[in-house]
Image: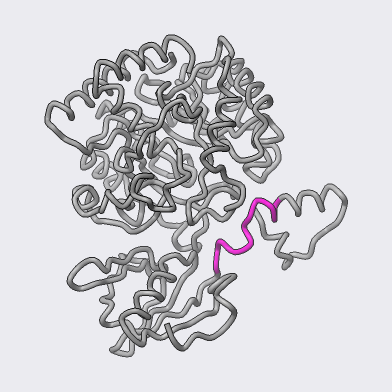
Amino acid sequence: MAGGEGPSPASSLEGFAAEATDAAALREIVEKAFDYRGDVTVTTRDGGCQVGYLFNRNHDVPHPFLQMLPTAGGLPQSILYADVVSIAFTGRDTASGKSYWAWRKRKEAERAGVILPPDSPSASGG
Amino acid sequence: MSVPLSQMWTVSTYVLGQKLRGRKRYPLVLMLEPLFRCNLACAGCGKIQYPAHILKRQLTLEQCLGAVDECGAPMVSIPGGEPLMYPHIGGLVEELVKRKKYIYLCTNAILLKEKLEGGVFTPSKYLSFSVHMDGLREEHDDSVCREGVYDDAVAAIREAVGRGFRVTTNTTVFDGTSPMRMRMFFEQMMDLGVEGMMLSPGYSYSKAPDQEHFLRRQKTQELFSQMLSHPGKRWRFNQSPIFLQFLMGKRDFECTPWGMPAYNIFGWQRPCYLLQEGYTATFQDLMDTTRWEDYGRASGNEKCQDCMVHCGYESTAVDYTFSSWRGFRETVTATLGTP
């Protein structure tokens, strides 16, 4: 993977983008996008881009492809790996901050009469 | 013993039929997820962590029935998301009953009373509401991250039982669960008149957001041993007693990931209900193109090492029952005795 920018992917990939410089980089970024719980933007060689949730990929076939459900709605779209230029993690990471312990912390704070700010990580659990 | 004889008969003849045909891999329960939308946001659930446009999507009734026919399993479990939020749930259940499929409608029961009062469902031996209950009031409300849900579920269970519906409970057991309180919970569920209870250990599948709260294998066995040893006389479980013995560490089995295939808006999920490693367009593709040898403990796949979840192992237990006279005898003994 090359061309990374934005926040460290160690926590969340939200805001991250990467170009597919070679086959290994392409496969790596597709796997990350497949695991990501938010929308991504895939830019293709014809200059177009597809925005949506990347729900499937298959690299065990003669022509590897990925599949997305567009944010705007409609049927699944398939894109060949060979056509992918870059992938950006443009949608909100819906799994970020949704932990049991975050919820427990918020509940304990509520019981103690403390109001956590809405943007607190502990206020987003559950 | 809490599974009705007619259901036992259907499952037995189905499994024996598969064996007579020489089918090594066959589905036992279809996990049909019509939608991911839910009216709860439980910390342990990775099913709802999707962008809004994905949560708005749902399978059509035709897609659901197509999957049921394609799969051919005698039992259909309808989880989600919350299936009572699926607008076609009444029609779906009606069609499945016509097909003589045994249905486990897995619900948090928040909407159940309303649906029952609205006449959406008719009691049938084929339909069982499988109400999500993760323990006594405090534990359950903690688990679903909302207070008051336990009381709503209890009220809905009473309503459903009173109207003559089959009602079971499904319980995910997490790390930190008190065996003593869980035994008290079993008594409470029996007081409510449920037909049987289903248990499964929580497992840290990769997309669940709450990784540290799930059980590892040895802990699972210790906890289930403490919970299920010297069981209460009234306790009834709506699952294979051999599977319960497996959870208690009395048996060792290998995973049967194809036993409970899952179908949702993305397609047929590979390889199992918990691991999301890709999707296929058809059930046949799922069965034919999944590298099954890459999954289960024997494969060495690290994701599978601690998993003891029902979707992988209950099918193994059922298959064991019908693979030899010994298996059958042991199951009968366990059914009539204690796990």
Residue A102 at what x, y percent from top left?
70, 56
Of residues A39 and B329, the one drawn nearer to the viewer in this rendering: B329
Write the residue at 50% across / 34% down.
B200
Left or right position of B140 against A88: right
What residue sits 23% from the left and 66% below the top? A60
Q: How is the image coloured?
A: one colour
Magenta range is A93-103
How many circles with numbers are drawn on the protein?
A: 0
Q: Residue drawn 19% across and 50% down?
A: B288
Q: Is residue B83 depicted above or below B180 in this figure? A: below
Horizontally, residue B8 falls left or right of residue B223, namely: left
- Establish if B198 lies above or below B201: above
Name the quarter where the N terminus of chain A is drawn. Answer: bottom left
Query: What x and y, as percent, mark residue B314?
Result: 38, 31
Q: Residue A31 at what x, y percent from top left?
A: 39, 69
Prevalent SS, magenta region? loop
**Residue B212: in magenta span:** no
Can I make out residue A44 in this image? yes
In the current view of this chain or complex, which residue is farthest to the right?
Answer: A113
Q: Quadrant of residue B171?
A: top right
Give the side of residue B302 with respect to residue A47, left or right: right
Whether residue B116 can be seen here? no
When asked about the image quadrant of residue A68, the answer is: bottom left
Percent from the top left, x then y, of residue B289?
A: 21, 54
In the image, A120 versus B1, the foreground residue is B1
Name above or below for residue B130 compared with residue A48. Answer: above
